[in-house]
């Protein structure tokens, strides 16, 4: 089973040179730590920054410079600042190439649920609905099962959904899966030491196994 | 140039009545109109509807207005950082209208720009789409959203001039420029107020036409929610 | 009969302190010369400038700074620059208080025609349709009659219209007229030496004369 | 940062095919991509559809492309300064789609911003409204307009950096920022190209995300249409 950092590390391998990327809160934020230095990519923060830099040193902290998770950040070389309407114009207009975000549930046709649990205080969807409705390429980072052990990869989402038919790929602590255009999760890679049978038993939605499924490789 | 200067926050918010619709700039606690919020706390008004991306924290920002029970309704995209907010909401003392952040930004922009409605893909197939018109363009589904306007919009900028021109700093810009345009009366508080002609016209983020009142604020606390540093 | 400059001078009296104003090409541009110095107003140019200053001296000419009539201009103190979408956001959003423009025809319900003559080369409406559909207060500056002597104040426009029910006031070489909410041109002032009868004979639309109609006063 | 630099105008426009849809920034002759227009004149292509507020003059700007018969259709708000244009139009050799200027600006903005349609009051009751959906909001009539997008958008900025960030000057900004966002490929020519990091992030008008190719142009003529001076 992968740690959160390993999930982030595996997702980082999906990143391509020249991409503009929006990273959600949680595991997705960690992805930034594993993007190879030789790749030129730009991280977008939906509160109005293109080119997120590393977290600041104590001396560099500026309360007027935060990311969408409200963390203090710095600006990378060549960054740009803009307002929230422009930021979502970028997102909605398809200019952001890759969105990586967390989820509570993903369905086998690519629906995602990650904003609301009935009966619990609803905090809001923030920018998630805009992001999932807009990006061409959406990768979900999440645990394969909930804390109570139930599969988060379902035939249909049971929670209120955030967006329909949008998730392209899922990286969990157990596996890398692609959402098939015809519905179903195509098992692409297993976490080291995790068997296809275990993944099958923990995937409530339709799992598609094609030939030998390789283990993930971490350099 | 038309001089928009008022003395201070107290004068700027003096005529905001109960039950009015306000917009307040800011994302989290960044770029919020701290001085105007303090001045509103001194006013004996209630029943406010506030459009703001977030609702502050318990002891800062819009959280202070909530604690004083001045707010009837919040129109926001994310309201997670506030226990008093949660208490009032669960007790039915507060209404909340949750809107996808990009839709919120665009509805406010539309309000200022005279566009009564537009199509967006955000929320299609979700409960956000309930009761809304859905239409297909180029093979993709979109829903129709309406503009948002306010009686007063209250924004915070870094620099401003007496003609109402504003320059923001860092990510403190966020919702402020669109809100400035979407309020019937826009009140701008700035860290540094200069004479008209002192700002470079090419660097202005909000043209003065949108701003009706401006003053130089003081004692900015700029509280940080998630102080995160590099090792 | 008023000269073009006198029409502009009369319209300048309609300007109020604190207004943002868009002046069309032709006579409206001349209005700027007659706005009293003690009034603080801001002139908007729809190609992206708020705060048009005087025409430049030879030394000041900047090809990157023109007005909507493509004339070289300067910037007034406290001006702001912006893009065309923002410019028309201002106009459409009702932030510009007063629009002054020329017309070929105005109808008695406030319709205006000023962009197209069937059979002639059509150059385009530019920003006129946006301006007349948006501004609360629209004043037309024009000659009372066409060169061939026909009235330009009509029961209905004969030319393709630019906007409906939008003109509030008209200043011609003969008169100042308001468009009545119930339809018709209310004669408010006569040009010096011009009789009510002459105005009546040159107004094809319904002319409303209420009591004594004063002559315009030029200081 | 991603480096978007190309060598020159020739390289920047080398793959623009015949019959493609282009957007070109500028208002009158101010802020037009002079270098790219010159480079296009060297290409053996035709059937172009060009979205541009104006169509240049006979011997400058888009007028040069018209003279070489490279243009099939113009989508503009005002095209009055060009005799060759008039000749081609009257002979049926050229199509023109005239659009109110604010609608044009907003349709282009919508194209870049992923908004397929919006309501605007411009043109209600006129021939511009023919065939369009009309709807009432708050007692006023509006018509529905669609987004505009292009295969290539070609813009001209004052300063730019290798990451594609752009700063415009004066009223040469005009349609350029919206067009940058509405082209599948945006080509930006700038008077001064600097390294990423040299421009103040707070002063950038067009964020680099919208720009795919950038180069430093040369020999800008910046012709003036109406040289008007104070006495």
Image: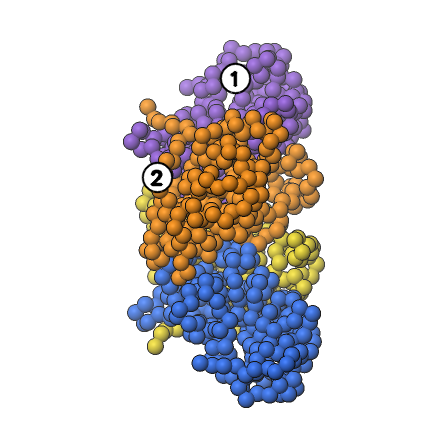
Chain colours: A blue, B yellow, C purple, D orange
Foreground mark, 2 or 1?
2
Q: Are marks 2 and 1 in one subunit?
A: no
Element at label 1: loop
Q: Name the residue nearer the viewer: D150 or A121.
A: D150
Seen in the picture, residue A97 relative to A201 is either above or below; the reply is above
Q: Quadrant of the C terminus of chain A?
A: bottom left
The structure residue drawn at horizontal position 36% and vertical position 38%, both measured from the top left corner, is D220
Residue C172 picture location, percent across and down: 54, 20
Residue C75 picture location, percent across and down: 37, 37
The structure residue drawn at horizontal position 44% and vertical position 32%, both measured from the top left corner, is D60
Seen in the picture, residue B199 relative to A85 is either above or below; the reply is above
The label shown at residue C173 is: 1
Residue C203 picture location, percent across and down: 62, 17
Seen in the picture, residue C145 relative to A30 is either above or below; the reply is above
Left or right of A135? Residue A118 is right
Badge 1: chain ID: C
Mark 1, residues whose alpha carbon is within 10 Å: few (<14), some, or many (≥20)? many
Left or right of A149? Residue B25 is left
Residue C124 picture location, percent across and down: 56, 31
Mark 2, residues whose alpha carbon is within 10 Å: few (<14), some, or many (≥20)? few
The label shown at residue D219 is: 2
Quarter of the rendering containing residue C65: top left
The structure residue drawn at horizontal position 31% and vertical position 33%, both measured from the top left corner, is C60
The structure residue drawn at horizontal position 67% and vertical position 64%, both measured from the top left corner, is B125
Left or right of B7? Residue A178 is right
Left or right of B41? Residue B190 is left
Q: Residue furthest front?
A: D44
Element at label 2: loop
Q: Name the residue nearer the viewer: A161 or D66.
A: D66
Seen in the picture, residue B145 relative to A159 is either above or below; the reply is above
Q: Name the residue nearer the viewer: D127 or A5.
A: A5
Q: Are marks 2 and 1 in contact (CB under 8 Å)?
A: no
């Amino acid at each position: 089973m992968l740690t959160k950092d390993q999930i982030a590390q595996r997702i980082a391998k999906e990143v391509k040179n020249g991409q503009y990327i929006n990273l959600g809160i949680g595991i997705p934020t960690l992805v930034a730590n594993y993007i190879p230095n030789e790749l030129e990519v730009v991280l977008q923060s939906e509160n109005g920054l293109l080119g997120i830099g590393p977290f600041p040193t104590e001396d560099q902290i500026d309360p007027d410079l935060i990311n969408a998770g409200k963390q203090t950040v710095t600006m990378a070389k060549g960054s740009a600042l803009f307002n929230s309407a422009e930021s979502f114009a970028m997102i909605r207009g398809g200019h952001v190439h890759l969105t990586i975000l967390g989820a509570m549930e993903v369905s086998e046709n690519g629906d995602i649920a990650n904003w609301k649990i009935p009966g619990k205080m609803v905090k809001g969807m923030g920018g998630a609905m805009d992001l999932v409705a807009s990006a061409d390429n959406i990768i979900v980072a999440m645990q394969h099962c909930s804390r109570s052990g139930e599969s988060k990869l379902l035939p249909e989402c049971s929670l209120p959904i955030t967006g329909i038919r949008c998730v392209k790929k899922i990286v969990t602590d157990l596996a890398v899966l692609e959402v098939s255009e015809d519905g179903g999760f195509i098992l692409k890679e297993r976490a080291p030491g995790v068997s296809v049978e275990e993944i099958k038993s923990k995937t409530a939605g339709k799992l598609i196994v094609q030939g030998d499924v390789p283990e993930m490789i971490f350099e | 140039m038309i001089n928009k200067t008022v003395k201070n926050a107290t004068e700027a918010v003096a005529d905001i009545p109960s039950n009015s619709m306000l917009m307040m700039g800011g994302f989290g606690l960044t770029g919020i109109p701290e001085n105007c919020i303090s001045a509103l706390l001194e006013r004996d008004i209630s029943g406010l509807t506030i459009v703001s991306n977030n609702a502050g924290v318990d002891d800062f920002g819009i959280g202070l207005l909530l604690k004083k029970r001045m707010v009837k309704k919040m129109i926001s995209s994310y309201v997670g950082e506030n226990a008093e907010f949660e208490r009032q909401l669960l007790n039915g003392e507060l209404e909340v209208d949750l809107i996808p952040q990009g839709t919120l930004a665009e509805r406010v922009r539309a309000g200022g720009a005279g566009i009564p409605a537009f199509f967006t893909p955000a929320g299609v197939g979700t409960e956000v789409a309930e009761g809304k018109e859905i239409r297909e363009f180029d093979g993709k589904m979109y829903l129709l959203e309406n503009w948002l306007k306010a009686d007063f919009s209250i924004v915070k900028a870094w620099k401003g001039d007496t003609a109402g021109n504003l320059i923001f700093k860092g990510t403190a810009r966020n919702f402020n420029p669109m809100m400035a345009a979407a309020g019937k009366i826009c009140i701008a508080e700035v860290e540094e107020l200069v004479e008209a002609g002192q700002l470079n016209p090419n660097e202005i983020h909000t043209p003065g036409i949108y701003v009706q009142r401006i003053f130089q604020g003081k004692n900015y606390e700029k509280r940080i929610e998630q102080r995160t540093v590099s090792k």
